[in-house]
Image (cartoon, rainbow, N blue to C red):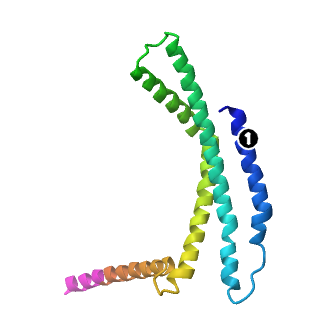
């Protein structure tokens, strides 16, 4: 597999994304009608969120595919030197060459600004999808089932913190009064 195969993978994915956005995403833009209109509209907002997550995930996987190919080429070059007699021909040496070439290649990639940018985009889209899932879970399952939501738990934690603070203050005042007597 060479760089032309990787480029064809990118071209295919870009073409697929353009067609998906032109056709399937337009379905999510159709206005909802009927008694479940609001619920349907909120659910349709998830299409672009998950499409963005899938798109960034595919870009990340394509980058890792390219890095794996590059590491394999480095390993093959070193293994050819091994066959030419420059390096001793043992399975342990081949294993060491494999570990070394893959480690070097991936370390270079993981330290690059491209990787950091890529991971930032992926994590951002992942967090957006996670937030959307949490909102939908709370609204459609927890609230109708009369179960506590994250907001409810956060409010309880704030109230508990406030009560503990008041108890500490009152206990301190009581100690002051008892010492004065």
Residue 179 falls left or right of residue 89: left
Q: Position of residue 147 (x, y in %)?
A: 46, 84
Q: In the image, what residue occupies the spot 63% across and 59% down?
A: 125
Question: In what quadrant of the picture does the N terminus appear?
Answer: top right
Q: In the image, what residue occupies the spot 57% across and 81% down?
A: 139
For label 1, the SS is: helix
Report which residue position mark 1 lands on: 8
| Vertical position of residue 110 compared to residue 81: above or below | below
Residue 29 is drawn in which quadrant? bottom right
Front residue of 131 and 44? 44
| Vertical position of residue 37 compared to residue 112: above or below | below
Q: In the image, what residue occupies the spot 49% across and 10% down?
A: 86
Farthest residue in the bottom direction?
35
Give the residues in magenta: 171-181
Task: Give the prevailing secondary structure in the magenta stretch.
Answer: helix
Any magenta on residue 115? Answer: no
Question: In what quadrant of the picture does the C terminus appear?
Answer: bottom left
């Amino acid at each position: 597999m060479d760089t032309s195969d990787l480029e064809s993978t990118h071209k295919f994915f870009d073409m697929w994304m353009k067609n998906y956005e032109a056709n399937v995403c337009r379905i999510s833009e159709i206005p909802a009608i009927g008694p479940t209109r609001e619920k349907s509209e909120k659910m349709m907002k998830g299409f672009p969120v998950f499409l963005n997550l899938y798109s960034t995930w595919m870009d990340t996987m394509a980058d890792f595919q390219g890095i794996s190919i590059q590491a394999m080429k480095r390993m093959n070059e070193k293994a050819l030197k091994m066959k030419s007699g420059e390096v001793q021909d043992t399975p342990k040496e081949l294993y060491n060459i494999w570990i070394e070439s893959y480690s070097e290649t991936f370390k270079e990639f993981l330290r690059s600004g491209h990787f950091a940018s890529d991971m930032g985009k992926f994590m951002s889209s992942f967090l957006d999808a996670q937030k959307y899932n949490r909102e939908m879970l709370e609204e459609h399952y927890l609230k109708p089932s009369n179960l506590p939501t994250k907001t409810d738990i956060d409010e309880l934690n704030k109230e508990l913190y406030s009560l503990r603070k008041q108890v500490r203050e009152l206990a301190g005042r009581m100690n002051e009064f008892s010492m004065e007597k």
